[in-house]
Image (cartoon, grey):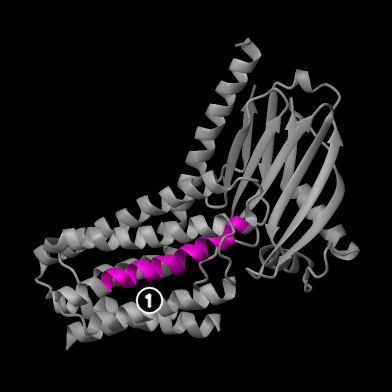
Amino acid sequence: MKTTIIVSCITLWLAVSSFQILHEIKISTSEITMNKNIMQIKIKFFADDLSSTLSQITKKAVLFNGTEVDAATLAHLNTYVKSNFAISINNTPVTYTFKSSLVDDNLSTQIKTVWVTYECSYKNPEAIKTFELKNTLLFDGIPEQKNISKIMLENREAKTLTFDNQNEDVKKLIQY
Amino acid sequence: MPLLEKTQQRYNHHHKMQEFWTYVTLGFTHISDIKGYDHILFIITLCCIYSTRDWKKVLVLVTAFTIGHSLTLLLSALKIIVFSSYIIEILIPITILITSLSNLIYTPTKEQQLFHYALALFFGCIHGMGFSNFFSAISMSDNILVELASFNIGLEIGQILIVILFFTSYTLLNIWKTIKQHDWKIFFSGAGAASSIILLIERI
């Protein structure tokens, strides 16, 4: 009898706690490339993850409809990206500007993603000694979030960095 | 070969290895993440009808599941098959439910054993599509095959570890207190069935 009660309780607990489950991959990807003097930053999010995080911050529903991010959302998104995706080259912060956005709604798989592209110019890429990236995108909204950033500077070894919300290491330094 | 070209080749090789490990780790942490335990639950419901003596059968079963999801990962990555994520997310709890229910009527005959292997292979295909859809959507790479293959290796390592941990727990618990194979099977099949029903309701 005692065993049956214990087994039933554990089973019930497993069943009830499974309300939390949605086994999606909670990641965002980004690519930083530098060719000649232009640095381009591309960031890709799952639309639902970005939507829920921005909605929490702005305290109103943020939706991604159409093929581009609308102007009102874009203002919030740019502020959000700039405070959570910071680049420093040779210990000097890099300022980047918004270039374009794309809402990619794949009708076959029914997965929607949001792309944003930023750009900046960098005068002397040969003199880059250190490259530091802080990537805490969606960390405030999604506890299991992981961000993967690929850094490809011309004539330098490409690097792939992983940022995990469960680690405290939110800044990564590359030395060339 | 010019020095610059040689250096670039070495850089590329380093980066490929680094990327490989990044995605292996991602695959491993993805499947072993206890918060999203539907895949762990599926592997456990598949294995709970066996004891440690049946390790060869478990090996065939895990291999069948692996072949299944590797196949659909590959086909989805190459865009040969495309399925709605909504349907796949509904099918995943159904696979757990069917496995749990089939466990209850399982008797170790050759026919039922073969049926169980076929089930693992087919259901592996469904789970593979789930992994692939999300992964392909977020990847930026033009050639995601290497990334997906690395991610898959991470999943495999995670799966093997789950199976080892499961049977180690069973063996250790048996040392402490004898647990009948039948009770073990009923417990995990019950947990699997209950969780999958709730998951199904939630996803519909």
Tell me if B197 is positioned left or right of A108 in this view.
left
Which one is nearer the viewer's eye here, A125 or B75?
Answer: B75
Provide the major secondary structure of the magenta segment.
helix
**Farthest-out residue, bottom:** A1
Residue at (57% x, 70% y) in the render: B83
Q: Whole-percent x and y of residue B195?
A: 40, 79
**The N terminus of chain B: image quadrant:** top right
Residue found at x 79% / y 39%: A40
Decide if residue A144 is in sight here.
no
Q: What type is the residue that disc 1 sits on?
A: Ile
Residue B189 vertical position relative to residue A32 in the rendered view, above or below: below
Instruction: Using the image, name the chain to which the residue with label 1 belongs.
Output: B
Residue at the far right in the pictured view: A71
Image: B46 above or below B151: below
Residue B7: % across, % down: 60, 17
Instruction: Where is residue A99? Give x, y as percent.
Output: 87, 47
Does the magenta segment cover residue A21? Answer: no
- For residue A173, side relative to residue A103 (left or right): left
Instruction: Give the labeled residue for mark 1.
Output: B96
Name of the residue lying farthest toward the top: B2
* Observer-nearest of B19 and B136: B136
At mark 1, the secondary structure is helix
Q: Residues within 10 Å of mark 1 (few under 14, many from 20)?
A: many
Tag count = 1
Q: Which residues are magenta?
A: B116-136
User: Which residue: 86% across, 48% down?
Assistant: A98
Q: Quadrant of the C terminus of chain B?
A: bottom right
